Amino acid sequence: MRLPRGLWKLLKEILRHLLRRPVAGLMVLARDPEGKILLVRRADSGSWALPGGTVEWGETFRTTAVRELREEAGAHVVSLGALRGAFSEPTRDPRFHAVTVVVEAQVAPQLDGPDNPLEIREAVFFAEGELPADFSHGTGDILRQILASPSVWE
């Protein structure tokens, strides 16, 4: 029997809470050719975040990065870059204990937009000096750290 995609996502979310194990996730510090940073506005909080999400069964971090950029922003990956950080603070994300790896990527300037407007409202490139102040799920702290240092881990 095949479950609808939305039901499958809900079931996985419930299992994460029941199993009480950290969730492996990925965020992408994606930049356009001008060096602007790609952010997405989340529908649940209305705040901004780096594109990313949980690693799906059978995926590598590389395939997760490409999939999440496509799903959340309609971004086309030009190249994947360096590992920028690993974040494991248990209280950063109120939903669950996320262990998040941050990688760099170069993306094309044209965005096709988010696949699911119930999850992501919009995707926008920002210059470093013009980043918004309202970040979701600890993204502001993560972004400040990776912009200040070539490599960060906790």
Image (spheres, rainbow, N blue to C red):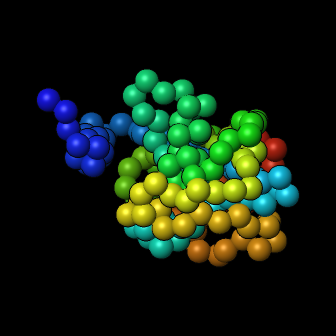
Q: Is 97 or 35 nearer to us in this picture?
A: 35
Which quadrant would residue 5 be assigned to in this image? top left
Which quadrant would residue 125 be assigned to in this image? bottom right
Which quadrant would residue 105 be assigned to in this image? top right
x 59%, y 63%: residue: 123
Quadrant in which the C terminus is drawn:
top right
x 37%, y 55%: residue: 95
Q: Where's residue 112, x and y in %? A: 58, 56
x 42%, y 47%: residue: 97
Task: Judge whether residue 69 can be spotted in this image.
Answer: yes
Quadrant in which the N terminus is drawn:
top left
Q: Where's residue 28, x and y in %? A: 64, 47
Q: Is 34 or 27 nearer to us in this picture?
A: 34
Q: From what the image shows, is residue 10 above or below residue 137? A: above
Q: Where's residue 60, x and y in %? A: 54, 27
Task: Judge whether residue 139 can be spotted in this image.
Answer: no
Horizontal relation, residue 95 to residue 48: left or right: left
Q: Is 139 or 132 nearer to us in this picture?
A: 132
